[in-house]
Amino acid sequence: MISPSICLTALWISWIAVWLLAARVTPGSVVQRSATSRLVYSGLMLGSALLLILQPRRIGLILWRPVVPDSRSIAWGGVFLVAAGLAFATWARVELGRFWNSAPSIKADHDLIRTGPYALTRHPIYTGLLLAVAATTLLRGTIAALGGLTLFAAALTLKIGEEERLLVRRFGEAYRSYQADVPAILPGFRLR
């Protein structure tokens, strides 16, 4: 029988492989972020990933499971949420099409996309990934995983700030109107 842990690993590996393949066929950007910004973001993401994949039998206290009980039904619920989050992020990536880039950037002839998941949140890729990482944290249930989620949220906060500044510069009042109409991350929440 397949375990939730194996499903979780398969979901993340499959998603990362498809995401990296898609990144190779995306056209270049006209405006990109600084090397320092990329380095900070990459460091936070690497730290997050390492904390999320640490296994409980290998390291002591940071892998203690203080909050989430080790339950099969919770684990399968977490797998479902990871799949839903990755599917939402993928839908957003497809909707963005040729304007997508892994780094905050502006493409030549860049259009402001407000359809599909972009009608629900300005950053639906991050919304989906945040759900998937939060569910992975739930599945792991460790202090280390909680630290990984925290680093991931910090990385997203930095990246969203950069993207918002780039998009306001590129689209001006049209983007400010979009900001007023659509929440940044969580549908129904008006945090900017």
Image: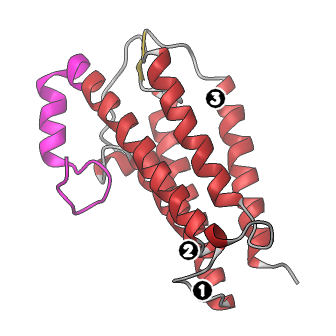
Q: Where is residue 84 in the image (x, y as percent from the top left)?
A: 54, 65
- The span from disc 2 to disc 1 (Cα, nearest Å) is 8 Å
Residue situated furthest right in the rendering: 1
> Which residue is at 42% across, 18% downward?
33
Q: Is 176 positioned to the left or the right of 146 in the image? A: left
Q: Which mark is residue 74?
A: 1
Label 3: few (<14), some (14–19) or many (≥20) C-alpha neighbours in 10 Å = few
Q: How many labels does the image show?
A: 3
Q: Name the residue under label 3.
A: 23
Q: Position of residue 157 (x, y in %)?
A: 35, 43
> Which residue is at 55% across, 74% downward?
138
Q: Work out whether mark 2 precedes mark 1 in sequence or the reverse, and give the earlier one.
A: 1
> Label 3 is placed on what type of residue?
Ala
Q: Is 5 positioned to the left or the right of 66 in the image? A: right
Q: Work out whether mark 3 precedes mark 1 in sequence or the reverse, and give the earlier one.
A: 3
Height in image: 54 above or below 5?
Answer: above
Q: Mark 2 points at which residue?
A: 138
> Which residue is at 55% across, 82% downward?
66
Q: Where is residue 152 in the image (x, y as percent from the top left)?
A: 49, 50
Q: What stretch is highlighted in magenta?
A: 168-192
Residue 139 quadrant: bottom right
> Which residue is at 80% across, 79% downward?
3
